[in-house]
């Protein structure tokens, strides 16, 4: 989470939040939390947990990432930390006993086929159907909805620095353009996709893919920034 006097940036996992939390924070003089009536809202806190009175007049900024790239990033992130002692259990659950790319991707794009909904997955969103939106969708759609629903400004991750420099904080344009990305936000489109795997994502996340206009692995959204309560 990144908070300034003018805006609140929500941090859905695997959408460049480390870059915003560390780099943008120092440029903008912001904070990594929002405090209100003795409560601190921070980290990967979803927007629906933050009271409207705490947000006040701030613009609420969500960052949306290409879904194909997002799935790759989640998969790589868990494997990366597993090499340093973290658990592969969630990949194992998604992959029905396997932790390789294809079975895990199938599980992430077909979570409604799980015999028992996952109580919480590695990206923070419930594995079962949302009570307010009971639709079969992949984890990218579920995570995007879970963290960001209600935001009024949406930024495509691929254009993040330029949008912040031109639209959100133009008084810091040069520094924002020069801010390096955290390496975990880079890449994601080089998974060696098969046509079938591309279709799994395209079908599972069709509603939100159409909303933002993504066209496949490595593509950008239809616009670098969207205004309004899209979800």
Image: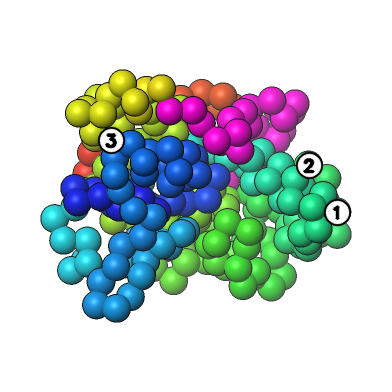
Q: Which residue is mark 1?
A: 98
**Rendered location of residue 160, percent (x, y):** 39, 31
Q: Residue at x 23, y 33 (%)?
A: 169
Pointer 3 residue: 226
Q: Secondary structure at mark 3?
A: strand
Q: Residue at x 44, y 71 (%)?
A: 131
Using the image as rendered, state which of residue 23 and residue 90 is in the foreground: 23
Mark 2 or 3: in front is 3
What is the x, y in percent for residue 2?
Answer: 36, 50
Give the residue at the far right of this rendering. 97
Residue 141's place in the image compared with 47, above or below, is above
Q: Are marks 1 and 2 in contact (CB under 8 Å)?
A: no
Give the side of residue 136 with respect to residue 25, left or right.
right
Q: How is the image coloured?
A: rainbow
Q: Which mark is residue 102?
A: 2
Instruction: Please state if 81 lies on the left or on the right of 67 as rendered.
Output: right
Residue 196: percent from left, percent from top: 71, 33
Residue 17 falls left or right of residue 47? right
Question: Most extreme residue toward the bottom, as rendered?
Answer: 38
Q: Residues within 10 Å of mark 3 (few under 14, many from 20)?
A: some
The answer to whether residue 231 is visible is no
Distance CA(mark 1)–CA(mark 2): 9 Å
Label 2 vs 3, first from the N-terminus: 2
The answer to whether the residues at label 2 and label 3 have Cβ atoms under 8 Å apart is no
Q: Is residue 131 left or right of residue 78?
A: left
Q: Which residues are magenta?
A: 179-208
Position of residue 206 measured from the top left corner of the image (x, y, whole percent): 49, 41
The quarter of the image holding the N terminus is: bottom left
């Amino acid at each position: 989470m990144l908070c300034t006097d003018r805006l609140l940036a929500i941090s859905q996992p695997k959408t460049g939040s480390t870059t915003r939390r560390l780099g943008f924070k120092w440029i903008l003089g912001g904070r990594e939390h929002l405090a209100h009536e003795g409560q601190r809202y921070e980290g990967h806190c979803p927007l629906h947990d933050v009271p409207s009175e705490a947000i006040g007049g701030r613009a609420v900024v969500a960052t949306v990432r290409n879904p194909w790239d997002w799935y790759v990033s989640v998969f790589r992130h868990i494997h990366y930390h597993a090499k340093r002692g973290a658990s592969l259990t969630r990949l194992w659950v998604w992959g029905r006993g396997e932790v390789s790319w294809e079975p895990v991707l199938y599980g992430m794009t077909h979570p409604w086929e799980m015999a028992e909904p996952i109580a919480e997955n590695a990206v923070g969103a419930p594995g079962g159907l949302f009570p307010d939106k009971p639709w079969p969708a992949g984890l990218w759609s579920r995570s995007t909805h879970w963290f960001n629903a209600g935001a009024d400004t949406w930024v495509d991750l691929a254009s993040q620095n330029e949008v912040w420099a031109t639209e959100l904080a133009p008084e810091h344009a040069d520094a924002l353009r020069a801010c390096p990305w955290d390496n975990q936000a880079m890449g994601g489109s080089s998974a060696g996709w098969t046509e079938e795997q591309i279709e799994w994502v395209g079908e599972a996340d069709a509603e939100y893919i159409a909303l933002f206009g993504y066209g496949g692995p490595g593509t950008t959204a239809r616009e670098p920034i969207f205004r309004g309560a899209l979800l």
